[in-house]
Image: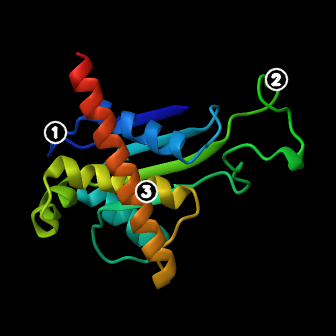
Amino acid sequence: MSVFVSDEQSAVDVDLARCVRLARLALAEERIPDDAEVALIFVDEDAITDLNRRFLDGAAATDVLAFPIDDDLVPGGRRPDEGGRGPGSPSEPDEPPVVLGDVVICPTVAARQAPEHLATFDDELALLVVHGILHLLNYDHAEEPEAVAMRRRERELLERFRQSEELAGEAS
């Protein structure tokens, strides 16, 4: 899995390596193919306000935006009845990677809203990374049942990440 990261703001320090680890874990847990690509882009309030206005008709800065790129998302996991190459088969060289899209996060907004959510800045940023990735994977929260499912999956992924970070800390 390729997770590209760009920090295009300077107001708040972001642990980019941690965000990449989290994104990779979330994608792996969702069984997204290994050749998938995602970009995490950290921007200032002016940039996210502009994106929010241009693409979502929003009026102000927001915490996270997700911009899916590939319309034909390759489903995760193995589906033997759908054909395909199967496990262990080499990928075809002319097959392009699955480009899932971009997750754009405003750390300044995250820092401001973290206390409102009774969270640390790092916890809030982690939630936004997972939230954005889930949006790329067609999760939504427009309707209550969808929102419940998305929040539940966010909690599961964040807990799995917390556990993996603890294990990594114990190993070092």
Whichever of labels 1 and 3 marks the residue nearer the N terminus, that label is 1
Relative to 124, is 6 above or below?
A: above
In the rendered structure, the answer to whether residue 99 lies left or right of residue 94 reads left
Q: Secondary structure at mark 3?
A: helix
- Element carrying mark 2: loop
Residue under label 1, please give it. Answer: 13
Tell me the element at label 1: loop
- Which residue was labeled with disc 3? 132
The residue under label 3 is which amino acid type? Gly
Q: Residue at left 23%, top 35%?
A: 15
**Which callout, 2 or 1, points to the residue nearer the camera?**
2
Q: In the rendering, which numbered label is found on residue 89?
A: 2
At horizontal 51% and vertical 76% (from top left) the residue drawn is 146
Asked if residue 43 is positioned above or below residue 36 in the image, the reply reads: below
- Name the residue nearer the viewer: 7 or 93: 93
Disc 1 and disc 3 in contact, CB within 8 angstroms:
no
Per the model, the C-alpha gap separating discs 2 and 1 is 42 Å
Amino acid under disc 2:
Ser
Mark pair 2, 3: CA separation:
31 Å
Q: Nearer the viewer, residue 153 or 123?
A: 153
